[in-house]
Structures are given as structure tokens and as C-alpha cells.
Image (cartoon, rainbow, N blue to C red):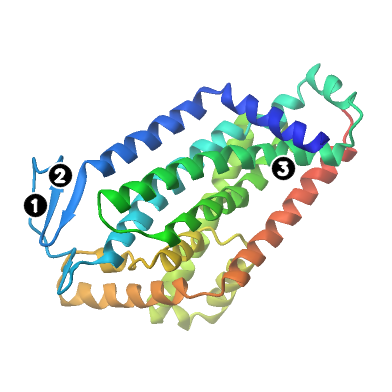
Amino acid sequence: MQVWALIVDSFRESLDRKIFWVLLLIELLVAAAMFCIGFEPGRIDVLFGLWTPQTDAFTSLSGLRTDRIAGLAVHFIMDLFLGWVGITLAIIATAGFFPTMLERGAVDVVLSKPISRPKLFLGRYMGSMVFVLLHATFFVGITFVIIGTRWRTWLPGYLLSIPLMVLLFSYIYCISAWAGVAYRSTVVAVIISLAAWACFFGIQTTGDLFETLPRWKESRAAYKAISTARWVIPKTQDITYLAARWSGASTSAGLVPEVDKDGQDMVQRADQSERERMYMNPIHTIGTSLLFEAVIVALAMWRFSRQDY
């Protein structure tokens, strides 16, 4: 009950932050933009027919291509708006949870309560998870309904994006929590966590290039170093691939318009690499990522429990 009370208290604190409502407004705007777009065989209706560009990207012998509709939902809507923009804003919104609690005066009141420091830490940490869970549920839920009613494509697997987005946030937030406890600064926590995310992204992207460009594998030492680093760090990019797989989406390379022959070879290699990533072992990618998170959370909790305030 003590931990639950702390979770509720942390969530209420997040409601007082303006960025909570900014994120909610962004989600509503994206949902409204999606609602203004419709797909018909051979054309796209924008603003309910005000503009109807012709295209064969969403047609097949049987009509609309479900995998491409799902691809748009996963790669451009979930990954970009909920993934990059949403997670970044969520990190900014929750980065102050620990530094604010550790301010002089506030920390004395908190530590005077009859609750252990590990429980206190976990309560604040899980409060941030609830913050993201609410936003992910709202955004994925409303876009799921729009995709089904407006785009006439029901994607039950798309709902699994909710826990996947919470997972993605937790991969990054563990760094923010550690930095918040170590430096007691919201700004530092935001900078370190986003820098770590950029580092994770860079390592994974470099690894993808090694797989797409065979010449890069000739440097065995670099390839082994990148492969080892990819195993250790959280697999943030894999979240999108898992969402695409469970939603029945096409690859992002499959959404690329027609290109010349040289470009086609590159797109085909990228498409093959994406398909291999989509059918990865989810237990491995999530398990190793959670292992990294558990280590960082344990370090942050240990520091919080042992440090004098």
C-alpha cells in the first residue's frame, strides 16, 4: 500500500506539470490529422476529399494493402510521434521526480516517513511508468479506432504497442533516474538520458549498416565490438520492429517510392535486414534490455539508499 500511495502521488505530481497537457495536445492533434486522411484503391483522400493524390502504394488486386496501412501506423505514427517525440517529452516531464524529491527541506519530510528507501525509490520510479502507460493507452487506443473506422483496417496487434512503448520509456528512464539521484539536477538528468538514448541509437544503426553493407564486415574487430555493444545496451530500435511484426506491418523500406536500380539494390538489402529484425527472438531482445535496466536501477537504488541527505 505504501508503494502504491507513492505511485499515485508521483502521478499526481506529473499532472501538475504543463508538459503532461502539452503531450496530450500533441496526441490529439496527431489523431485529428489521421482522421482527416482516408485511403481508397488508387488514391488518398486528404481533408475528406479536398485533395486526392493518385497513388498505387496502397492498392493490390484485392483492394487496400493492409500491411502498408499497418506500416504507416507503426513506422510513421507510433515510432515518430509516440516513440521519438512522445518519449522525449515524457523524459523531460519525469526527469524532475527524483531531483525535486531530493531538494533540501523536501527530502527531510520524505525520509521521515515510515518507509524504506528502496520502496520510496520504486514508488517514484513506478509513478513515471504510470505516466507513460496512460499516454500510451490513450494515443494507441484512439489511433486504433481511427485506423479501424476511417482507414477500414482493424489491427488487433497494434494494441501491443502500449506495453512496448512503456518498455521503450523504461529503457531510457532508468538512466534518467540514476542521473537524478546522482546529480540531483533535472537538467542533467534530461541531458544524460537523451545522450544515452542517442548513443544506443547510434550503436544499433551502425550495427544495421554492418549487416546492410557487406564490405563493413571485413573489419572483424569493429564488427565484433559493435555486436558486443548491441548485446549489452537496451535495444530501443527493436521496439518498432516488434510492433511492426505483431501488427502485420510492412517494413519501412517497403514504403519507399520507386527508385533507380542502384537505389533498388540498397532498398532490397535494407528490406531484408528489417525483415530479419522483425522476426527476432522477443525474449532475447526484451530480456537483455531489461537486464541492462535492472542493473542501472539497482545502482540508482543503492546510491539513493546509502547516500546522506
Which amino acid type corresponds to the residue marked 2 in the rendered image?
Answer: Val
The mark that comes first in sequence, 2 or 3, is 2
Which amino acid type corresponds to the residue marked 1 in the rendered image?
Answer: Pro
Q: Secondary structure at mark 2?
A: strand
Residue at horizontal 54%, vertical 81%? 220
Q: Is residue 302 rendered to the left or right of residue 232?
A: right
Q: Residues within 10 Å of mark 3 (few under 14, many from 20)?
A: many
- Contact flag, marks 2 and 1 (Cβ < 8 Å): yes
Quarter of the image for residue 55 reads bottom left
Question: Along the line of sight, which residue is nearer the eye, 289 or 13?
Answer: 13
Q: Nearer the viewer, mark 2 or mark 3?
A: 2
How far is disc 2 from disc 1 in space, using C-alphas? 8 Å
The residue beneath circle 1 is: 53
Question: Along the line of sight, which residue is nearer the eye, 154 or 102?
Answer: 154
Which amino acid type corresponds to the residue marked 3 in the rendered image?
Answer: Trp
The residue beneath circle 2 is: 46
Q: Residues within 10 Å of mark 2 (few under 14, many from 20)?
A: some
Could you say where residue 239 lies in the image, as x and y percent from the top left? Answer: 50, 60
Q: Nearer the viewer, mark 1 or mark 3?
A: 1
Quarter of the image for residue 308 reads top right
- Disc ID at residue 178: 3
Residue at horizontal 64%, vertical 25%? 13
Q: Secondary structure at mark 3?
A: helix
As drawn, 184 above or below 274: above
